[in-house]
Amino acid sequence: MTELTVGIIGGGPWGMAVLDRLVTLARRKRARPIRIVLFDPAPFGPGVHDPDQPGHLLLNTVTNQVDSFSARHFGEVPLPGALPFLDWMRQSDGNVSTSGFLPRRTFGAYMRFVFNTLKENLPENADLLALNLAVTDVQPRHDARYRLTDSDGGQHDVDHVFICTGHGQRGVPVTDRRDGALSPYPCDALHSAIAPRSIVGVQGMGLTAVDVVATLTEGRGGRFAEAGDGSLRYDPSGTEPVIYCFSRSGTPFSCRPSETLDLSGRYTPIFCSAEALPQDRALDFEADVLPLLCAEMWAAFAMRHAALRDGPEAWDGLRARFVEIAPESVEQLAREMAGTECETFDPRGLLLTSPQRTGLDARDASDRVMAHLHRDVTEATKGEEASPYKHAIEMLRVNRDFIRAAVNHGRLTPQSRQLFFNRVAPAIAQLIVGPPLSRGREWLALARAGVLRFELSRAPDIQRDSWYGHWTARSGGRMARFDSLVCARVGHGLETDPLLTTMVAQGLCSRISLPGLSYLSVDADARPLDSTGLPLEGISVLGVPSEGSTYFNHYLPSPRSRAHVFEQINRALTALTERADSRQGIAA
């Protein structure tokens, strides 16, 4: 039988997902010789989750929701020695919480275990060549294969290539930015670039900003302690800078609930189904998609409120009423059932948040951020089951596949695609892709200690004095001078990946550009579309590089709602083997 050669560019969690399915394929088809060539300049498995990074950098995924082996998703017998993250952790620590958030370096060690386990499970018909090199070029050959050129000049011919390069930023020096700002990663490099007791601006208030702030505070010896009133106290080391955080929206992250129901795959949506979307035209997000999302969130809010007030049976009774009414009537019924508790709940406003105007009062801006953090910490502390607000917000995670069905592969009009990726997707990320509850408590403590400042949080006007090397920020009548500026917004894979840039320049991939949005065009099978609009058979672009053409690719491959990538890989491998069998049949 003809040998299949598969290239995997990127050896992090997404590359390991490809290797996992290839090992399974090889074990299932013992008569098929399979050669795998894996490329990554960094150690295989961890990706950006370096096992040597500081312990204060945390995952934002709950421990029991991570499994980098896909067998249980497909109902297969697990590979010998394969373990989910939680079971692997409990081998050394039996007290690990199922709903906790562990350090990223621990996950990095787990991914190293994943790589070794996959290698150990390679059958005799499979061969793995793992090269600590980058791929600099991909060229189609005349025989429908591809030639990959590595950073040492070596060439490798493959039948199929999986591009899993993520953000493409590993190893970028912290000061290697044309605008003079500092890159956030690697975080440890910030210590040499930022002097103690200096003044720093942090551009962004999401997960990346959380990492930067933790590095410049706890990472410099500061400590958090319980204050006795339910809050935290921060005891500084004396080497911290003063940190001004700000963003376009002026709204910081939202914390993950202390306890989650993990309803993905178990909750049946009332309104958010692909069948509810118009099938005969391009979609307008505000008119066609947003009303269904808002209805689902209102219903979830009211049902959770009813269950808390009147018992579990009240959930079923109210759900039956929602099933019988139109989406546009849901808010009114929800308000009738939840009363004053829902006065501050506004799904539409949360999802259509827009950048704040500059020139607003600085004290009000700071108070607004602190109020947001206080309210969010309070709700997150209750947990998803006891907080109707957090329960309703989690509907954005539960209905992620519905959002993908509405957004992916050109379903939206260009104007709506621009709206979604520039405003709605960041708002969803702010609401549900947040850090653990502990981070919200820590930011409140840092603000009370005067280390973290929010007076300029609403889209300040920033100017750089290139002569003196400092920055001036103005907002709401307040001005601050920064000794350093950290751009705490991780770039899009297409913007930061030299291989993808080369492929676009060569016409192998097409770039779609809209105001504020630029992305790589891929089809429903993850194949890049070339400059003529045709799909490239034999290439799969997975994860972050496909963001924009598809929605939400910033997750760790895992079962249930995070198993999408394994299914994509399976489809690609099925097509690959069918092509090989067809060629062999023709040759015979």
Image (tube, rainbow, N blue to C red):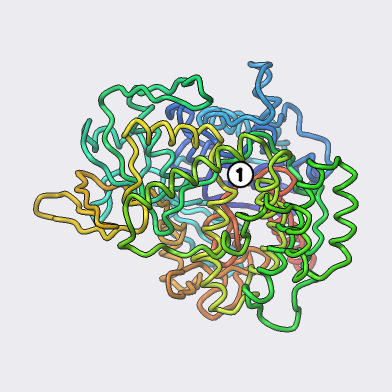
Kindly give the residue lying farthest to the front in the view shown: 340
Amino acid type for the residue under numbered disc 1: Leu
Q: Examine the rendered structure and indicate whether residue 327 appears above or below residue 228.
A: below
Horizontally, residue 511 falls left or right of residue 573, namely: left
Front position in the image: 464 or 234: 234
Residue 249 x/y as whole percent: 43, 58
Residue 391 in view here? yes
**In this view of the protein, which residue sits in the foreground, 441 or 575?**
441
* Residue 326, percent from left and from top: 81, 71
Estimate how packed mark 1 is, as few (under 14), some (14 to 19) or many (20 or more) residues with alpha carbons within 10 Å.
some
Which residue is found at the position 45% from the left and 39% from the top? 42
Residue 281 vs 326, above or below: the answer is below
The residue at the far left in this view is 467
- Quadrant of the rendered image containing residue 188: top left
- Based on the displayed image, in which of its 4 quarters is residue 504 positioned? bottom left
Q: Which residue is mark 1?
A: 556
Is 577 on the left or on the right of 216, as rendered?
right
Where is residue 345 shown, x and y percent of the image?
Answer: 63, 55
